[in-house]
Image (tube, rainbow, N blue to C red):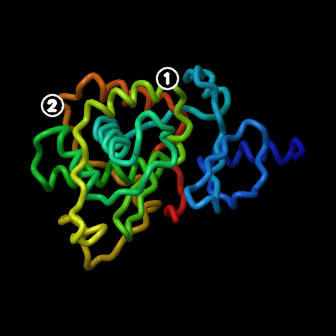
Amino acid sequence: MNTADTALWWARARALGPARHEAGTPAPDGFLRLLEPHAGDVWLLPAHPGTAGPWVLDEMGFSGPTIEQPNDTARMLAAVVRCCWTDPEAPIWPGREVDWETVLSVYRTFGDREESVLNRAATGAIRRLNGGGWVLWDDDRRVVRLGPRCGTWVNADLTVLRELYRSLPPPEEPEEDEEYGETPPDHDQGAGSTPVRDQANLPGPPADDDDAVDASMMDADAHLREVPASVGEEDRGDPA
Protein backbone atom coordinates (compact mmCIF):
# COMPACT_ATOMS: atom_id res chain seq x y z
CA MET A 1 0.00 0.00 0.00
CA ASN A 2 1.52 3.30 -1.09
CA THR A 3 1.59 6.63 0.74
CA ALA A 4 -1.46 8.02 -1.06
CA ASP A 5 -3.58 4.97 -0.18
CA THR A 6 -2.46 5.15 3.45
CA ALA A 7 -3.35 8.84 3.66
CA LEU A 8 -6.78 8.10 2.18
CA TRP A 9 -7.45 5.38 4.77
CA TRP A 10 -6.60 7.74 7.63
CA ALA A 11 -8.73 10.52 6.16
CA ARG A 12 -11.70 8.17 5.91
CA ALA A 13 -11.18 7.03 9.49
CA ARG A 14 -11.20 10.63 10.71
CA ALA A 15 -14.35 11.45 8.77
CA LEU A 16 -16.39 8.25 9.11
CA GLY A 17 -15.09 6.37 12.13
CA PRO A 18 -15.04 2.54 12.21
CA ALA A 19 -15.77 0.92 8.85
CA ARG A 20 -16.97 -2.62 8.09
CA HIS A 21 -15.33 -4.48 5.18
CA GLU A 22 -14.94 -7.97 3.81
CA ALA A 23 -12.48 -10.04 5.82
CA GLY A 24 -9.78 -10.00 3.14
CA THR A 25 -9.69 -6.22 2.73
CA PRO A 26 -6.13 -4.88 3.08
CA ALA A 27 -5.48 -2.00 5.47
CA PRO A 28 -2.40 0.12 6.24
CA ASP A 29 -0.18 -0.28 9.28
CA GLY A 30 -1.62 1.22 12.42
CA PHE A 31 -5.15 -0.07 11.88
CA LEU A 32 -6.85 -2.53 14.19
CA ARG A 33 -8.76 -5.44 12.65
CA LEU A 34 -11.76 -6.72 14.59
CA LEU A 35 -13.26 -9.87 13.11
CA GLU A 36 -17.02 -10.34 13.18
CA PRO A 37 -18.29 -13.55 14.88
CA HIS A 38 -19.22 -15.15 11.56
CA ALA A 39 -15.68 -14.33 10.25
CA GLY A 40 -17.03 -12.96 6.98
CA ASP A 41 -16.52 -9.27 7.76
CA VAL A 42 -13.96 -7.21 9.64
CA TRP A 43 -14.03 -3.80 11.28
CA LEU A 44 -11.05 -1.56 10.51
CA LEU A 45 -10.24 1.37 12.75
CA PRO A 46 -7.10 3.21 13.89
CA ALA A 47 -5.24 1.72 16.83
CA HIS A 48 -4.14 4.52 19.16
CA PRO A 49 -1.50 4.24 21.90
CA GLY A 50 -3.11 3.42 25.22
CA THR A 51 -1.43 6.45 26.80
CA ALA A 52 -2.52 8.91 24.12
CA GLY A 53 -4.02 11.95 25.82
CA PRO A 54 -6.36 14.54 24.30
CA TRP A 55 -3.46 16.61 22.98
CA VAL A 56 -1.99 13.64 21.08
CA LEU A 57 -5.36 12.68 19.67
CA ASP A 58 -6.03 16.25 18.59
CA GLU A 59 -2.71 16.33 16.73
CA MET A 60 -3.67 13.10 14.95
CA GLY A 61 -7.01 14.59 13.96
CA PHE A 62 -9.04 12.46 16.39
CA SER A 63 -10.35 15.00 18.86
CA GLY A 64 -12.38 13.80 21.81
CA PRO A 65 -16.15 13.46 21.58
CA THR A 66 -18.77 16.02 22.49
CA ILE A 67 -21.52 13.97 24.10
CA GLU A 68 -25.05 15.08 24.78
CA GLN A 69 -26.38 13.86 28.12
CA PRO A 70 -23.05 12.25 29.14
CA ASN A 71 -24.43 10.67 32.33
CA ASP A 72 -27.25 8.83 30.58
CA THR A 73 -24.91 7.85 27.75
CA ALA A 74 -22.33 6.42 30.16
CA ARG A 75 -25.02 4.54 32.07
CA MET A 76 -26.32 2.98 28.88
CA LEU A 77 -22.82 1.96 27.78
CA ALA A 78 -22.28 0.36 31.20
CA ALA A 79 -25.58 -1.53 30.86
CA VAL A 80 -24.66 -2.81 27.40
CA VAL A 81 -21.21 -3.90 28.63
CA ARG A 82 -22.80 -5.75 31.55
CA CYS A 83 -25.24 -7.56 29.26
CA CYS A 84 -23.03 -8.25 26.21
CA TRP A 85 -19.64 -9.06 27.78
CA THR A 86 -19.98 -12.79 28.22
CA ASP A 87 -16.94 -13.28 30.47
CA PRO A 88 -15.11 -10.37 32.18
CA GLU A 89 -11.92 -12.42 32.25
CA ALA A 90 -12.03 -12.92 28.48
CA PRO A 91 -11.61 -10.34 25.68
CA ILE A 92 -14.54 -7.96 25.48
CA TRP A 93 -14.94 -8.22 21.69
CA PRO A 94 -17.16 -9.36 20.08
CA GLY A 95 -19.46 -10.20 22.97
CA ARG A 96 -23.01 -11.46 22.52
CA GLU A 97 -26.21 -10.02 21.10
CA VAL A 98 -29.02 -9.28 23.57
CA ASP A 99 -32.54 -7.94 23.25
CA TRP A 100 -33.55 -4.43 24.27
CA GLU A 101 -35.53 -5.42 27.35
CA THR A 102 -32.50 -7.23 28.75
CA VAL A 103 -30.41 -4.05 28.52
CA LEU A 104 -33.23 -2.00 30.05
CA SER A 105 -33.34 -4.35 33.04
CA VAL A 106 -29.83 -3.18 33.98
CA TYR A 107 -30.34 0.44 32.94
CA ARG A 108 -33.32 0.72 35.32
CA THR A 109 -31.05 0.08 38.30
CA PHE A 110 -29.26 3.43 37.85
CA GLY A 111 -32.14 5.48 39.21
CA ASP A 112 -35.79 5.51 40.16
CA ARG A 113 -37.58 7.20 37.26
CA GLU A 114 -40.97 6.99 35.65
CA GLU A 115 -41.05 4.41 32.89
CA SER A 116 -41.76 6.99 30.18
CA VAL A 117 -38.81 9.14 31.26
CA LEU A 118 -36.54 6.13 31.50
CA ASN A 119 -37.50 4.89 28.02
CA ARG A 120 -36.88 8.33 26.56
CA ALA A 121 -33.45 8.57 28.19
CA ALA A 122 -32.51 5.02 27.16
CA THR A 123 -33.59 5.52 23.54
CA GLY A 124 -31.58 8.72 23.19
CA ALA A 125 -28.51 7.12 24.79
CA ILE A 126 -28.53 4.00 22.59
CA ARG A 127 -28.83 6.14 19.45
CA ARG A 128 -25.88 8.29 20.46
CA LEU A 129 -23.75 5.24 21.20
CA ASN A 130 -24.72 3.59 17.92
CA GLY A 131 -23.85 6.78 16.05
CA GLY A 132 -20.34 6.72 17.50
CA GLY A 133 -19.65 3.01 16.99
CA TRP A 134 -19.75 2.13 20.69
CA VAL A 135 -22.69 -0.22 20.22
CA LEU A 136 -24.37 -1.88 17.23
CA TRP A 137 -28.09 -1.27 17.49
CA ASP A 138 -30.58 -3.05 15.22
CA ASP A 139 -33.74 -0.97 15.32
CA ASP A 140 -35.81 -3.51 13.38
CA ARG A 141 -35.00 -6.51 15.56
CA ARG A 142 -34.61 -4.46 18.78
CA VAL A 143 -31.31 -6.09 19.67
CA VAL A 144 -27.95 -4.61 20.63
CA ARG A 145 -24.33 -5.74 20.93
CA LEU A 146 -20.97 -4.14 21.61
CA GLY A 147 -19.64 -1.88 18.88
CA PRO A 148 -16.15 -1.93 17.35
CA ARG A 149 -14.87 0.97 19.45
CA CYS A 150 -15.20 -1.24 22.54
CA GLY A 151 -12.63 -3.53 20.93
CA THR A 152 -10.03 -0.75 21.14
CA TRP A 153 -10.05 -0.61 24.95
CA VAL A 154 -6.64 -1.38 26.43
CA ASN A 155 -5.91 -3.34 29.62
CA ALA A 156 -6.14 -0.26 31.84
CA ASP A 157 -9.64 0.44 30.54
CA LEU A 158 -10.70 -3.18 30.95
CA THR A 159 -9.51 -3.23 34.57
CA VAL A 160 -11.93 -0.40 35.40
CA LEU A 161 -14.70 -2.04 33.38
CA ARG A 162 -14.25 -5.37 35.16
CA GLU A 163 -14.84 -3.64 38.50
CA LEU A 164 -17.89 -1.93 37.03
CA TYR A 165 -19.14 -5.23 35.61
CA ARG A 166 -18.96 -6.90 39.02
CA SER A 167 -20.70 -3.98 40.74
CA LEU A 168 -23.77 -4.10 38.48
CA PRO A 169 -26.67 -6.53 38.91
CA PRO A 170 -27.03 -9.31 36.33
CA PRO A 171 -29.52 -8.67 33.54
CA GLU A 172 -33.00 -10.17 33.56
CA GLU A 173 -33.00 -12.62 30.68
CA PRO A 174 -36.26 -13.03 28.72
CA GLU A 175 -38.35 -16.15 29.24
CA GLU A 176 -37.94 -18.82 26.58
CA ASP A 177 -41.57 -18.52 25.52
CA GLU A 178 -41.40 -14.75 25.10
CA GLU A 179 -41.08 -13.30 21.63
CA TYR A 180 -37.45 -12.44 21.01
CA GLY A 181 -36.85 -8.77 20.54
CA GLU A 182 -40.26 -7.67 21.83
CA THR A 183 -41.07 -4.05 21.03
CA PRO A 184 -40.75 -1.74 24.07
CA PRO A 185 -43.96 0.04 25.15
CA ASP A 186 -42.82 3.43 23.86
CA HIS A 187 -42.10 2.21 20.32
CA ASP A 188 -44.48 3.65 17.72
CA GLN A 189 -45.38 0.57 15.73
CA GLY A 190 -47.58 2.48 13.32
CA ALA A 191 -44.85 4.91 12.26
CA GLY A 192 -42.34 2.18 11.48
CA SER A 193 -38.64 2.14 12.29
CA THR A 194 -36.46 5.16 11.69
CA PRO A 195 -32.84 4.51 10.68
CA VAL A 196 -30.43 5.10 13.56
CA ARG A 197 -28.16 7.18 11.34
CA ASP A 198 -30.99 9.72 11.00
CA GLN A 199 -31.52 9.81 14.75
CA ALA A 200 -27.96 10.03 16.01
CA ASN A 201 -28.09 13.81 16.37
CA LEU A 202 -31.52 13.98 18.01
CA PRO A 203 -31.36 15.66 21.41
CA GLY A 204 -31.61 13.35 24.39
CA PRO A 205 -33.95 13.73 27.35
CA PRO A 206 -33.63 16.61 29.82
CA ALA A 207 -30.53 16.39 31.97
CA ASP A 208 -31.07 14.64 35.27
CA ASP A 209 -28.39 16.31 37.35
CA ASP A 210 -29.94 15.20 40.62
CA ASP A 211 -29.31 11.53 39.93
CA ALA A 212 -26.36 10.19 41.86
CA VAL A 213 -23.72 8.48 39.78
CA ASP A 214 -21.43 6.16 41.69
CA ALA A 215 -17.65 6.18 41.47
CA SER A 216 -17.50 3.27 39.03
CA MET A 217 -19.83 5.05 36.62
CA MET A 218 -17.74 8.22 36.82
CA ASP A 219 -14.62 6.18 35.91
CA ALA A 220 -16.44 4.67 32.94
CA ASP A 221 -17.62 8.12 31.85
CA ALA A 222 -14.06 9.45 32.04
CA HIS A 223 -12.80 6.64 29.78
CA LEU A 224 -15.65 7.29 27.36
CA ARG A 225 -14.71 10.97 27.11
CA GLU A 226 -11.02 10.21 26.43
CA VAL A 227 -11.54 7.72 23.60
CA PRO A 228 -11.23 9.34 20.14
CA ALA A 229 -14.68 9.39 18.64
CA SER A 230 -17.27 11.90 17.50
CA VAL A 231 -20.32 10.40 19.13
CA GLY A 232 -23.53 11.32 17.45
CA GLU A 233 -21.84 13.09 14.52
CA GLU A 234 -21.00 10.30 12.07
CA ASP A 235 -23.44 9.46 9.32
CA ARG A 236 -23.19 5.74 8.84
CA GLY A 237 -25.66 3.05 7.93
CA ASP A 238 -27.30 0.75 10.38
CA PRO A 239 -25.36 -2.32 11.47
CA ALA A 240 -26.06 -5.41 9.45
Judge from the rendering whether residue 157 lies leftward or rightward of residue 22; answer left or right. left
131, above or below 218, in the image: below
Q: Could you tell me which residue is drawn at 41 percent across and 52 percent down?
A: 201
Which percent across, then down, holds residue 23?
70, 58
Q: Which residue is mark 2?
A: 210
**The quarter of the displayed image where residue 191 is located:** bottom left
Q: Could you tell me which residue is drawn at 29 percent across and 55 percent down?
A: 123
Q: Which residue is mark 1?
A: 156
Judge from the rendering whether residue 124 lies leftward or rightward of residue 130; answer left or right. left
On residue 205, the disc is none
22, above or below 79, in the image: below
Residue in front for this viewpoint, 196 or 161: 161
123, above or below 31, in the image: below
Label 2: which secondary element:
loop
Calculate the distance from the C-alpha at mark 1 to the C-alpha at mark 2. Answer: 30 Å
Amino acid at circle 1: Ala
Label 1: which secondary element:
helix
Of the two numbered discs 1 and 2 in the rendering, the one whose residue sits closer to the viewer: 1
Which percent across, then down, holds residue 72?
28, 40
Q: Could you tell me which residue is drawn at 53 percent across and 51 percent down?
A: 234
Does label 1 or label 2 sit earlier along the sequence?
1
Judge from the rendering whether residue 139 lies leftward or rightward of residue 174; answer left or right. right
Amino acid at circle 2: Asp
Which percent across, then down, holds residue 7?
79, 42
